[in-house]
Image (cartoon, helix red, strand yellow):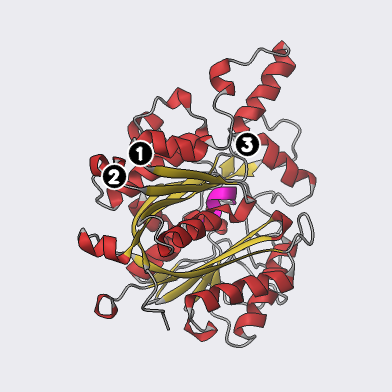
Amino acid sequence: MLDKSAVRVVVTGMGVVSSIGIEAAEFLDGLRSGRSSVGHISAFDTSGFDHAMGCEVVGFSPEHWIRTPPESLGRAGQFSAAAARMAVAHAALDPAALRERPCLVAVGTTDGEARDLDQLVETELEHGPGALEPAVAARVPAGRLSAAVVHELGLNRVEAVTLPTACAAGNYAVGYGFDAIRAGDVDLALCGGADALCRKTFTGFYRIGTIAPERCQPFDKNRSGILTGEGAGVLVLESLESAVARGAHIYAEVLGFGLNCDADHPVAPNEDSVAHCMQLALDNAGVKPADVDFISAHGTGTRANDVTEAAAIRRVFGTETAPPTISVKSMLGHSMGAASALASIGCVLAITEGFIPPTVNHVETDPECGLDCVPNHAVEARPRVVQNNGLAFGGNNAVLIYGRYDQELA
């Protein structure tokens, strides 16, 4: 049961830049319909690669979404600022009033503005050292992702944090905001993750043999790896008291989260550690495994991740009683630091709208995984409690538990 003496944290707004939809409504439609965003990568020259499919954001015009001059930001910063502005609008917050309100901005990332670093390398190879324009060099620091949100919204009383905990960074950022609100440091936080598709990360995954030739098939017997993607997701978190006082629409409640870092291996997940992190999250949320209606898995589509994550899930939830376990990466690709933030928004939308998103591209479930991955088609449901897994290189794990907000229990 929830500790009624603790500050309760709710979600009152969501902003999305993704390869299957921009803004929450379009993202919801993409999740429900099982939309796939796979195409040939155009972000950089893919000559020399045997295959180069990815999940890019198309149709994003920064001038339409942000007031900050787009040329002053890298692509990830543009995504971050745009998703934050969308989230504020979605939460029906007055931007003018928000400027003087104490708040937190926490953005998780894997690559920061590595896309600009790619440009630096290419420019210097072609023209020699010092050829890169200073304006481009100024966009590179990863801290710019949270600073972009602060500048875009004109926030004055704010802590801005960029968390570089790789592929679990979005969940880390939401957990950071959850802690800050529960501790009474602030009563409002903008939290999420952002990354732009870049050559460095694609090449790194390609070299270790984990880039799929055509499609991402989490938990499928014939899965062959990830597809790199990009985007941003930002959630507005508020104390329940703040949300009720301003008459905000409450989409869901953050019930709890768990973090750990086993540092066991640079890239291979550790089953014991993943299981422990899930149990930490359940304990922190005060819910039992049987209470969880579905799991949004990290679900990368690599052989090592899917088998290990599935085994950890069966250990915590039981082999015969594990809940449906889906992977939105089958639709979005792996958007790195944005991945678990976008998956978090997917969890909240599933709770609000009454469905479980599908795992698309599915043909045959791997017996070693042995989970119901809701293949290919969303199912109607009334989830009350949803778990979102974020697992990262270096053993950085972050698991969030979301619940339906019941006004009569407030």
Residues at marks 1 and 2, CA–CA distance in whole angstroms: 7 Å
User: Separation of disc 2 and disc 3 at Cα?
Assistant: 33 Å
Question: Which residue position holds label 2?
Answer: 98
Q: Amino acid at mark 3?
A: Cys
Which residue appears at 57% of the width and 53% of the height? 169
Task: Give x and y (percent) for residue 64.
Answer: 33, 32
Give how far across and how far down residue 216 sits, in percent: 62, 56
Q: Quadrant of the C terminus?
A: bottom left
Q: Position of residue 119 (x, y in %)?
A: 64, 24
Q: Amino acid at mark 2?
A: Leu
Residue 214 versus residue 347 in the image, above or below: above
Q: Disc 1 on helix, strand or loop?
A: loop
Disc 1 marks which amino acid?
A: Leu
Residue 164 within the segment the image draws in magenta: no
Q: Is residue 90 left or right of residue 264?
A: left
* Dot 1 or dot 3, earlier in sequence: 1
Q: Is residue 34 among the parts visible in the rendering?
A: yes
User: Of the residues tagged 1 and 3, which is closer to the observer?
Assistant: 1
- The range drawn in magenta is 334-340
Foreground label between 2 and 3: 2
Question: Residue beneath label 3, please?
Answer: 198
Residue at numbered disc 1: 155
Of the numbered discs 2 and 3, the one sitting upstream in the chain is 2
